[in-house]
Amino acid sequence: LHWQDLTDYKKISEAIYEYDGEQFVRVMPVSVFYLIAAAKSVGLGLASFCGLYTPDYAAGIMLTTWFTCLELAIITAFACMYSSFTSPTLSAIFTLLTVVAGRLCEDIYYFAQLMEHYASREGGLAGSKLVSYYMAIGAFLATPNLSIMNQRASVIYPEFERVDLLLLIYTALYAVVYTTGVLSVSIMIFRRRNFK
């Protein structure tokens, strides 16, 4: 985004050409301008990444990037855990299934609540419906909730999607604790393996 802003046609023409009263005179070669623009865009990108500089057109992108990194940390922790006790193919399949279940985690919870709502109209949960309800709640609690780390809508629609600071802190702590827990389980499993 910084590169696009710095290499706008109007900015290029203002930097390369100067009007001396009669005509436009080239004051800088195009290659020099592009080198300067590349250096500026890298510097501004690093400043944006560190949170030191945030232009209007990039508001919220770094927050989304950090939460995507936390989401990837959880996924990588699960991949490490699965690879500590299964083959590489099964580890990849289990990781993919964990990602799908993590993205659908809130939907699993809403399904359980919907099941409870419809059962309350029929006289309550009983028998197989009760077992299905508790299995859905158990699946919700066991899978990582990756959908809470999806802050992409706040970047696309900043006027409609306001981000709550307390929710951001909770999400970051959730990701760090979940990643630490899964990596701890992975370490315990890996230590018990016998490589002889």
Image (tube, helix red, strand yellow):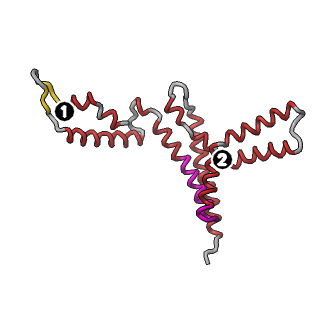
Camera-side residue: 57 or 115? 115
Give the residue type that dot 2 points to. Ala
Which residue: 29% across, 42% down?
A: 38
- Disc 1: which residue: 16
Q: Quadrant of residue 95?
A: bottom right
> Quick one: label 1, few (<14), some, or many (20+) residues within 10 Å?
some
The residue most toward the left is 22
Which residue: 41% across, 42% down?
A: 50
Find the magenta span and give its range: 70-89
- Disc 2: which residue: 101
Asked if residue 48 can be seen in this view, the reply is yes
* Residue 118 left/right relative to 191: right
Q: Quadrant of residue 87?
A: bottom right
Camera-side residue: 77 or 21? 21
From mark 2 to mark 1, how far is it between C-alphas? 54 Å
Residue 119 is situated, as x and y percent measured from the top left of the image, at 84, 35
Give the residue type that dot 1 points to. Ile
Above or below residue 136? Residue 116 is: above
Q: Where does the N terminus fall, quadrant-wise?
A: top left
